[in-house]
Amino acid sequence: MTDTPAVIRFEGVEKTFPARSGTGAVSALSNVNLSVPEGAIVGVIGRSGAGKSTLIRLVNGLERPTAGRVVVDGTDITALSESGLREARRSIGMVFQHFNLLARRTAYDNVALPLEIAGVSAREIKARVEPLLDLVGLADKRNRYPAELSGGQKQRVGIARALATQPRVLLSDEATSALDPETTNQILALLRKVNAELKLTVLLITHEMAVIKSVADRVAVLDGGQIVEEGRTFEIFARPQHPTTRSFLSALTGATLPAYFVDRLKSDYAPGAQAVLRIVFTGTHATDPVLSRVSRDLGIDINIIQAQVDDIAGEPFGVIVVSVPGDPQTLSSIVASVEGQGHATEVVGYV
Ligand SMILES: Nc1ncnc2c1ncn2[C@@H]1O[C@H](COP(=O)(O)OP(=O)(O)OP(=O)(O)O)[C@@H](O)[C@H]1O
């Protein structure tokens, strides 16, 4: 899938939770194959119960797979003893949705905790913790207790703590789900910063496509315990294949049309109807020439219903919704012309 070596690899992973009295066995993950390339930020998105937490907990050995392997930095995590796991976990940092800070410890002491556990000297701890508090922008809050910090500040402490043991991999379990949109953006920017500055590989799980859009280089869509779609974030946004991916995307990228318009949409062509076409442009400048060329070459009128330019993982991404003549022959010529110029199309319906 990419030439960069994988730092995390799921190989044919299955996870079934055994039956309990009153409930049958639960298949949480089946046939999961996924590679997280070195230095990448990979997002896994799925609905509640899709298996995201189980997937991430397999990476640091909090769960063991029923079948298959999880390889982290060359080590098969699934084959390790408890003491081997403790050692491996030092190279795997984790950030949690509810921060999981110790209330009776200051910000500094929370960040220091994993180093104390690892038996690092107080001097060495100071040398590591202070730059981390600087990195996450909390140097002035070092002596504050969690109750004295905002949600975003608590998550900054959580991130600094996850980085204390100088991990190669950072796991993020819905790190921004408890935060407001502005704080979410600040924390996602911090994740991007640690990814870039510390060359850290990041695997994050989320149920929000906006999080994926903002930070992830690649995305895997998890549905019912299986990865139903995976690829570069930009490609997935441009050409979503699976219905689950499409439904996650529907609130973004111009896929949401005004309600008055949606009410008029029909799924089938009736003679004389206009087709509504969603076109994804993989470059901001391409919009005008493409539409005017199609209009000129085919001698048709094109009405623009909605247009939007967005930013997906740092790349410009344009979505335009147009209405065009809906008769099947003309429509297929339009689609062929637009796609022939390298852009993706989707017939949304007819009006
Ligand atoms: N320890 C467990 N014992 C039994 N079943 C479990 C256990 N942990 C998870 N499951 C089941 O496995 C499935 C996947 O759960 P998981 O927590 O991984 O989903 P999720 O995508 O993280 O959901 P959410 O977004 O709600 O946290 C669910 O059906 C869940 O009920």
Image: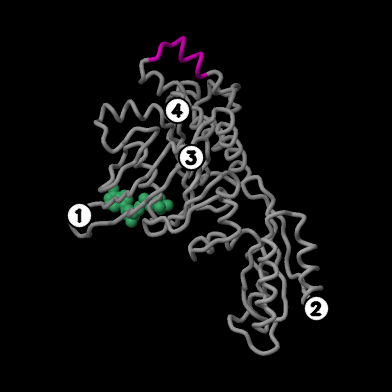
**Spatial CA span between label 1 and label 3:** 37 Å
Of badges 1 and 3, nearer the viewer stands: 3
Alpha-carbon span between mark 1 and mark 4? 36 Å
| Residue type at numbered disc 3 | Pro
Q: Based on the displayed image, in which of its 4 quarters is residue 263 positioned?
A: bottom right
Tell me, for residue 20, which label it has, or none. Answer: 1
- Is the residue under label 4 in contact with that under label 1 (CB below 8 Å)? no
Label 4 sits on a secondary structure element that is loop
Q: Mark 2 points at which residue?
A: 299
Q: What element carries label 1?
A: loop
Q: Is residue 348 one of those drawn in magenta?
A: no
Q: Which residue is drawn at 54% across and 38% down?
A: 151
Q: Where is residue 165 in the image (x, y as percent from the top left)?
A: 43, 23
Q: Residue 167 carries which label?
A: 4
Which three-letter amino acid code belongs to the residue tagged 4?
Pro
The reply to whether callout 2 and callout 3 are in contact (CB within 8 Å) is no
Between disc 2 and disc 3, whose residue precedes?
3
Q: Distance between the residues labelled 2 and 3?
A: 47 Å
**Residue segment shown in magenta:** 120-129
Q: Earlier in the sequence, mark 1 or mark 2?
A: 1
Query: In the image, what residue occupies the spot 76% across and 71% down?
Result: 294
Select label 1 or label 2 by which is in front: 2
Q: Front-most of 224 and 232?
A: 232
Q: Please say if the residues under marks 1 and 2 sit with CB atoms less than 8 Å apart.
A: no
For marks 2 and 4, give the CA distance.
Answer: 60 Å
Residue located 67% across and 90% down the image: 271
Q: Does the residue labelled 1 lie within 8 Å of ligand 1?
A: yes
Label 2 crowd bin: few (<14), some (14–19), many (20+), radius 10 Å: few
Marks 2 and 4 in Cβ contact (< 8 Å): no
The residue identified by callout 3 is 37
Rounded to the nearest angstrom, the CA distance separating label 3 from label 4 is 15 Å
| Image position of 266 (left or right of 18) | right
